[in-house]
Image (tube, rainbow, N blue to C red):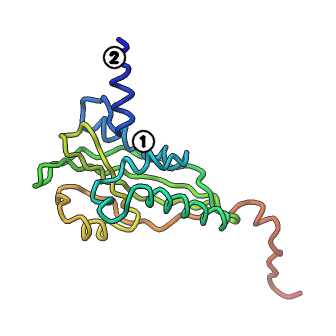
Amino acid sequence: MPQLLVIAVFCLAQGQTLAKDPLEALQATAKRYVEAVVKHDDKTLVSLYPPAVFERVDRARLIELIAHDRDEMKKKGLSIKSFEAGPASKPVQGADGQLYGAVPTTLVLDAPEAMITLKSFLIGVSKDQGKTWVYIDGANSADAVRREYTDLPEELILPAKQKPGYQLKTSVLESAEPVKTGKP
């Protein structure tokens, strides 16, 4: 029994999941991805990036860049209120033998004057028939992702880019000058 626990902890530490169903594993690992973003767990987040990313930038440098971006957000008064992964699409096999799945995401940022909602997606990629997954961020647009990752199967349906949603905070509205209408 203790050996099974050690194996489970090792698998989770390596970005793996014990789920047998590829869809379950895709969803569970996507949830770990968004939780890592919210908790500022940059090591876990980077462990869920595709190996191709590390051909361009070293892991340690990438972790520094993520922390720098978070600091820049903080300086602008932005913080993550929530980040959630929606229901994943059924994985699709690509011509390269890998599985691909799309996971819609909703990121809510707390800004000084408003709450900003950003709808995007992650693309899960598995080289081992769905046992482990790494993720490509689709924040730019489906077209941009397809241009950069040409191996994505056409059957993989990616969500369309959506405009950000803004909800003004009440305190901003209460402190605003009254609107003058008509004649004085």
Q: Amino acid at mark 1?
A: Lys
User: Label 1's element?
Assistant: helix
Q: Position of residue 114 (x, y in %)?
A: 66, 63
For this orientation, the residue located farthest to the top is 1
Residue 180: which quarter of the image? Answer: bottom right
Of residues 79 and 52, the one drawn nearer to the viewer in this rendering: 52
User: Label 2's element?
Assistant: helix
According to the picture, the residue beneath numbered tag 1 turns out to be: 31
According to the picture, the residue beneath numbered tag 2 turns out to be: 3
Compared with residue 67, is residue 183 higher up or lower down, i.e. above or below? Answer: below
Q: How many marks?
A: 2
Q: Position of residue 7 (x, y in %)?
A: 33, 24
Q: Which mark is residue 180?
A: none
Q: Quadrant of the C terminus?
A: bottom right
- Residue at 39 percent across and 27 percent down: it is 9
Q: Tell me if 46 is positioned left or right of 76 in this view.
A: left
